[in-house]
Amino acid sequence: MEFSIKTGNAEKQHSNCVIVGVYESHQLSVAAQAIDEASSGYVTNILKRGDLDGKLDAALMLHNVPGTQCERVLLVGLGKKSEFAEKQYCKAVRTSIKAAAASGATDAVSFLAELPLGKMDIRWKVAHLAEVVLDASYRFDAIKQKKGAEEKSPKKGIKKLTIAIADTKDLSEAEAGLADGKALASGVSLAKDLGNLPPNVCTPSYLAEQAVKLGKHYGLKVTVLERDKLEKLGMGSFLGVTQGSEQPPKFIVMEHLKGKKSQKPVVLVGKGITFDTGGISLKPGAEMDEMKYDMCGAASVLGTFKTIAEMDLPLNVVGLIPTCENMPDGRATRPGDVLTSMSGLTIEVLNTDAEGRLILCDALTYAERFEPSAVVDIATLTGACVIALGHHATGLFSNNDALAKELLHAGEAALDRAWHMPMWDDYQPLLDSNFADIANIGGRAAGSITAACFLSRFAKKYDWAHLDIAGTAWKSGKEKGGTGRPVPLLTEFLVARANKANK
């Protein structure tokens, strides 16, 4: 989609479609008022008939409105004016672009970024408008057969969107916001694409290839460690998970080094299980196809790196992605086996389906060599987190309250929220083993917490946080697909870190 930014009057726009907002109780936004005055009350009369109540998720398309230069005027519900905030703004933007795309319009001018939005400035409003529009326009059809008739007939949709702003002095900030929004959308789209690809395409080798491509395109340093190197490093826990698969494991190291040389990096660690059968502790067959999404932690790291690279973010960031499959064959790890991790700690495998923590723990040990300012791992780790928090909030665990607060704040600002979960020492004994230093599960009770407790044993030498995205990384049912979360949260977190480091 092509974007542009300009100032102008709503009623004078020569466009297929002009988008303006209407609050509940028929309260018109400034742009809607201008169209209403130019049309001698045409909009007000339509609203009085009850065709639009102004509630969120509602929209009404008007054609040939008197006194205007455009073909269509799209009225978008904003909800109650007193309650109009960031979440309502993004919902209205999403509703507007879907309604406009369903019409015959190919270009549109949106006046939604002119709406007053508390303390949010024009840069924030434009950035989120662009990101939401691109997210709402996302389609995954890369591996669908192209039908001849479909290729010949042009698809509906907005090809060009102009974002209207009220004051020319805000133009530079609006342009910066547009660049931010497009960069974020680009990273979210990559994370979605990787999650949505089938597991016979998106293998560990494929993820490594995508990382190398990103490195070449954006000038990132990318290293891919193969099995022999992992053996020399002593990553027995990681290798224990992969030994039942024909696909070779990969350990991807990405470095975005745009901060000062003296600046300690932030390390992002993404779980990259490209397909999870559960191993010998085989999962039920129902919905097992969704286990292709068990690499969404890895996808979010790749997506975040694409975003910060496009932003040219002045920060040192390292990405670590241990990636493999978890398959059951004659060589696969068995329940009862004991693995020796890179840290030297021995792990009794009580359930081979608790494999994510087994690959992450070696990555967390590997992270020590970077002397990080902070480490954040991202993983579709536990079904227990879905039970606890559903699909709205990511589970957040940390050994440092200040780091946890940074991530919580970033999630709120990015509308990609997380919830701080407990990780008290009281839970640690649940991981006791009679035969090794630690067991890989702690029983059914507090499953997401004991998983985080397991990881914490390998993250004692730095500030660390764990994001359990099992409930937020993808949607099931009719809208099945990757969400791209938590790329927005991670991006906001890194941008805030860069701003603080460069003050």
Image: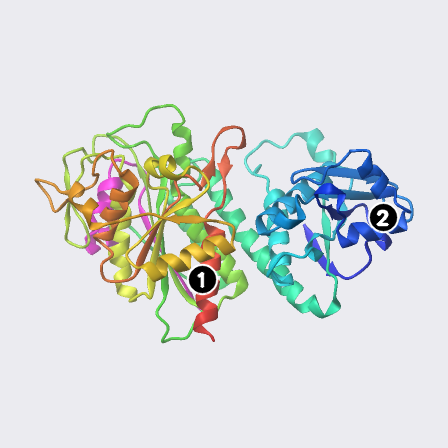
Q: How is the image coloured?
A: rainbow
Left or right, residue 83 beside residue 12 = left
Q: Secondary structure at mark 1?
A: helix
Report helix, strand or loop for mark 2. helix
Residue beneath disc 2: 36
Q: Is residue 319 magenta?
A: no
Three-letter residue code for mark 2: Asp
Circles 1, 2 touching at the beta carbon (< 8 Å) = no
Gap between marks 1 and 2 measured at Cα: 44 Å
Q: Nearer the viewer, mark 1 or mark 2?
A: 2
Q: Residue at x 50, y 33 (%)?
A: 480
Q: Nearer the viewer, residue 453 or 408?
A: 408
Q: Is residue 253 magenta?
A: yes
Residue at image location 72% in from the left, 44% down from the top: 158
Residue 157 in view, yes or no: no
Q: Position of residue 308 (x, y in %)?
A: 49, 61
- Asked if one can make out residue 395 in the rendered structure from this viewpoint, the answer is yes
Residue 361: x and y in percent read: 25, 50
Q: Amino acid at mark 1?
A: Leu
Count of numbered circles in the view: 2
Position of 294 with respect to 440 (left or right) is right
Q: Nearer the viewer, residue 209 or 362?
A: 362
Q: Give percent across and percent down for residue 263.
A: 37, 73
Question: For the view shown, which residue lies furthest in the left direction?
Answer: 434
Graded by Cα atoms within 10 Å as few (under 14), some (14 to 19) or many (20 or more), the crowding at tag 1 reads many
Give the magenta-colored segment's residue range: 228-257
Residue indicated by mark 1: 494
Mark 2 or mark 1, which is nearer the start of the sequence? Answer: 2
